[in-house]
Image (spheres, rainbow, N blue to C red):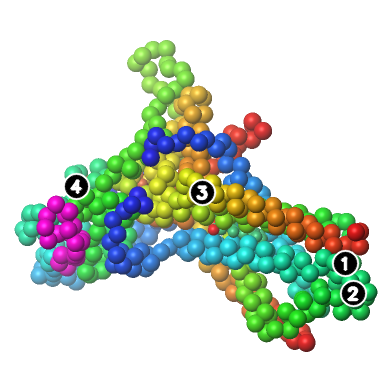
Amino acid sequence: MSQSYNRGTVEDFGRWREFTAGMWAWIFHKFTGWVLVGYLFTHIAVLSTAINVDPAAAQSSADIYTNTIAGLESLLVVRFLEVGLLAVAVFHILNGIRLLMVDLGVGLESQDKSFYASLVLTGAIVVASVPTFLGGKLV
Amino acid sequence: MAEHYSSFERGGRRWLFQRLTAVFLIGVLAFHFVLLHFVNHAADITFLGTQARMSQVGYFATMWLFLVTATFHGVNGVYNALVNQGLTGSQKNAVKYLLVVAGLLLVVQGTRVALAMTNLV
Amino acid sequence: MSTQIEQQETETEEQEAEPEVESPGDRRRAAKRQRLQEEEAQRVAEEETLDDEETVHLKVFRYDPEVEGKQEPRFDDFTVPYHKGMTVLDALIYARDRYDSSLTFRHSCRQAVCGSDALFVNGRQRLGCKTQLSDLEDPVRIEPLPHQEVVKDLVVDMEHFYDQMEAVEPFFDPDELPEDDLEEQRQTRENRETVKMSTRCIWCGACMSSCNIAAGDNEYLGPAAINKAYRFAMDEREGEQRKQERLRIIEQEHGVWRCQTQFSCTEVCPKDIPLTEHIQALKRESVKNNLKFW
Ligand code: HEM
Ligand code: SF4
Ligand code: FES
């Protein structure tokens, strides 16, 4: 099947228009999943500064671990990226719960509604969290 | 095609573990986010604060399990996505080992980091 | 179509006979029936306003590797006089009989039982004979099923689809037969309900064509084949030995686990088979079956 005749963009266009809830949910879940693994690797890399911190410097919060995190947090981009990460994580969790229900065969007939609900809830939670993420001292 | 089904993989254990780890991650990821962004602002994190948390056995164990389950869940998810795209044969095997190695390295490094954060070593 | 209405009536009767078993599928089908009725009412209302001179504009995919000038795929335009109740298949037949006898497509029963005429109509997999032109926007774009090799015009190669269907060994193999040769092999009413919808498949291939996992992974069994496996594995009369073998087939890496619950197959199936529901049931069945051996 993958060797199917390429019928060009005409066909693809129609396909996108007819994308249904379940397909969008899949694409979003995939995307958010990849972002989360990507972040996990980066996160551990950043936290690796905790190895061999100078105990004396740590007492006055002047060690590289504390400095690295504070340095990153002082950048406005990083704050925005964190809001993005929150959005990604919240959607992945909510849609993940939806998928677990589908796996259990619960509420299959409202799978589209639960997808829209995940989207709306994600949006609400993210908007509500923006002050917390962007607020706090930027150094 | 029909006749090519020879490599049996009984059970879909990976499928089941993907769901089981997901259930665990729901709680831990939400907890992690709330604790380190809302209760303690990310900008205010210091090594001493981290050390105080990580030196509690229960918290340490939770974070370490978080690391292991998230690594399995994430790496297995990526592998599945690639198989869905029709990855087969030696390419598939290469990717499989690459992902296993990457996952193991992440767990090893993550464990080193976690230990360094405690006042145990 | 008159056949459709009749079918609806019998289904209501069945439901009245057994109101106690209401599954999610039943609810969804009830909702779908209601939606169909509303759509039908709207269609009838719309048709009243049409006059006799109405025409439909078809854009039909053309391709024939054996004819010079048709090797490059293109769309041909046909303008077909519209009459009330006309289906996509009727319009294609008209275009072939009146304008271009080389226009090629498969069809046979004209009443959604043979499964020959699944087509990609206005961006979606549908049965030509079951799709009313009045439900579609003009122009009506008709293409062969995506993700299959095009043989000619609207005809695709179904070989791979049939291979996958046969891979699940779709035949009945009970452990014990009734003493008397002439006796029926009985099944409880509840069990009949469990497998009822899965028996309706007409092998049209619409589901497989709509699935973007099947599009990427050539070895994936696909919704129709898994539904076939469900039909037998969930039948209480199936022999234990055969059921184990069947589960072993669907539990391979390219079996049920590839399903990503996108529901695209369930959306397009012209026989309203709850394919995703059945695939999920088999995933759970397989996990349960294997937990015993740990
Ligand atoms: C917090 C709770 C989480 C839940 C409930 C959850 C749920 C799920 C589920 C059910 C799947 C399977 C989708 C399928 O195969 O049909 C999945 C896929 C995935 N998850 Fe998660 N997950 C969570 C956290 C995470 C985390 C922390 C990561 C990153 C390390 C992650 C990365 C992924 C990836 C990469 C996939 C595969 C995406 C794809 O199909 O391409 N998930 N998740
Ligand atoms: S399951 Fe439905 S869409 Fe798929 S082949 Fe059978 S009738 Fe066609
Ligand atoms: S012609 Fe038989 S299903 Fe349409």
Dividing the picture into quarters, in which one does residue C140 lie? bottom left
Q: What's under tag 3, amino acid-wise?
A: Lys
Report if the CB atoms under discs 3 and 1 are less than 8 Å apart: no
Residue A74 seen in the figure = yes
Query: Can you tell which mark lies on residue B51?
Result: 1
Looking at the rendered structure, the kind of residue marked 1 is: Gln
Residue C41: x percent and y percent?
Answer: 29, 63
Instruction: List the residue tagged with mark 2.
Output: A58
Q: Residue at x 35, y 49 (%)?
A: A1
The range drawn in magenta is C57-77
Horizontally, is C3 left or right of C160 in the view? left
* SS at circle 3: helix
In this rendering, which labeled residue sits more in front, label 3 or label 1?
3
Residue C40 seen by the camera? no
Report the front residue among A86 and C58.
A86
Label 1 chain ID: B
Q: Nearer the viewer, mark 4 or mark 2?
A: 2
Corner quadrant of residue C135? bottom left
